[in-house]
Amino acid sequence: MFDKTNSKENGLTNHAVSLNRYPTPKYYFPRRYLLVMIGFLGLCMAYILRVLISTTVIDMQAEYNYSNSFKGLLLSSFFMGYLSTQLLAQPLCDKIGGKKTLLFGLTLSIISSLFVPLAAQSKVAVVFVRIVTGITQGITYPTMNWLMSRWYPISERSSLASRTWTGAYIGTILVDFISPLILEYLGWEKAFYIFAGTALSWTLLWAIFIKDDPKDVIIGIHPNELAFINETEEKQPSEKSPLINKAQSYGSINQEVATGDSRSDYFASNGASMDEQESQLVKQNDIELPYFKVVKILLSSKALLTLLYFNLVTSWGFYLLLMWYPTWLLSVGVQTGIELSFFNALPYFISAVIASAMGVVADKLMARGVKKIIVRKVLGVLSAAIPGVFLFLIAFCKLSDKTQIAFMVIVVCSNGLAAAGPQMVTLDISPRYAGVTMGIGNFVATIPGILGPLIAGVLLEKFNSSWTQIFSMSATFYLSGAVIWAIFASSDKVL
């Protein structure tokens, strides 16, 4: 077992020691970054297709005379479909693999978005198309979790996962900034054609470069990187040296294997060949529990139940603002065009920076000995308490329009703190069944995605376009989530 005490005495973090123990050639590109980059783009495209309606619906409402109630229904219809496939992702991944599951799901979601302009002439048809877009996209986050648990090493998991999930914020930024300009100069229909057409290019990258297991990546992977990825907290390889003691040229390794030398010719200092070490790693995870038994065990754990409550109450405000934020901006005096684009995108840009930075900070803190649960709790509490407080201020204090916008930016960007906090708990409590934990968590989180935008439309009609009731309700939910998370949150492994 690797001696963590010695690593601290030498002034090195556990992560730095792990990298030193698994050297790769100087100009070697770590293959795990393929999932970071292409997964990032996938989530970016997914959120573009999800959020685009929040801006285009303003012009659609004017053109087709939608009421606020129907507008709320249209904004929530994506989540009606999105809810239905959350729990199907893990079985699909286990049966056909995560690569195919995400490829088929997101491709169909892209294609369905191309039909929105045609369907908009009928209220029933446009709602149906948005439901289909949600159904086909519902597997996205659970499948990404399934893949990340196989591609990302434990010591980098918070930072790499946060960078991948940042794609959702970047997608929101792009659509919130660009779509008002497209609406201004080209019309709302063109926005769907431009964004969905661009998103199709992602499918090619995913199909070529992503595999279910990093060892199968088409451009090859260095044995040391594979060993680093497979290293676990429970059982780490010998401290003395990595799988290959010298950072040989990766090309020369491939050449030797190609000319007849087997993978078993590469030995660690303990005498075990690469094949033997991989076999030992596989044996640790060769027991596959039935799906419903996994769900039952997870649902009986305090860790997941706490996460489900947190997701339920915080997603209410997050999804409500995701769908209604552009409409609210117009209500406080923001002008269409470049001004709407700027304020629409600003909080999500800050969220992306925060999410990416917090992933790195979380890994560094844990490497320095800070308990994982402390990191997860602090980030979770802040991600819920800050929006709760500022939404109450917006709802009940007499503020200028500029102050309201500034406070709302703080509300939205605070969600970025959750990327290395509660969102990581889905991987913490069950790395083996990360797709199941994310599926259950997203299933519950999607319920307010349906109800929030829908109820907001009804309340706006009932209270003469006042946002006070909407924001005070969201603030209460946020603050209750902060309290429950602070008391009951857990990152202990369940399965």
Image: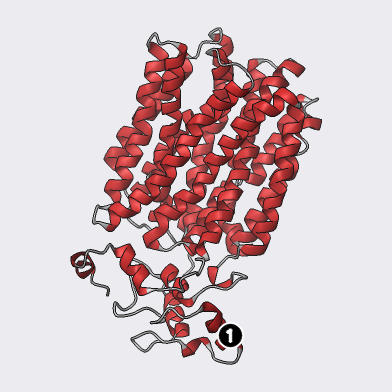
The residue depicted at 43 percent of the width and 75 percent of the height is 281
User: In this view of the protein, can residue 132 be seen by the observer?
Assistant: yes
**Residue farthest along the bottom direction in this orientation:** 260
Question: Which element type, helix, strand or loop, lies under badge 1?
Answer: helix
User: Looking at the image, can residue 429 be seen?
Assistant: no
- Identify the residue position indicated by label 1 in the image: 255
Q: Position of residue 380 (x, y in %)?
A: 35, 40
* Residue 103, image x, y percentages: 66, 55
Identify whether 100 is placed above or below 52.
below
List the single residue furthest toward the front: 26
Q: Is residue 133 left or right of residue 396?
A: right
The residue sitting at 51% across, 60% down in the picture is: 33
Q: Tell me residue 456's x, y (percent).
A: 55, 20
Q: Relative to residue 55, is residue 420 drawn left or right?
A: left
Q: Quadrant of the C terminus?
A: bottom left
Nearer to us in this view, 353 or 149:
353
Q: Nearer the viewer, residue 465 or 163?
A: 163
Q: Residues within 10 Å of mark 1 (few under 14, many from 20)?
A: few
Classify residue 447 as left or right of residue 191: left
Q: Amino acid at mark 1?
A: Gln
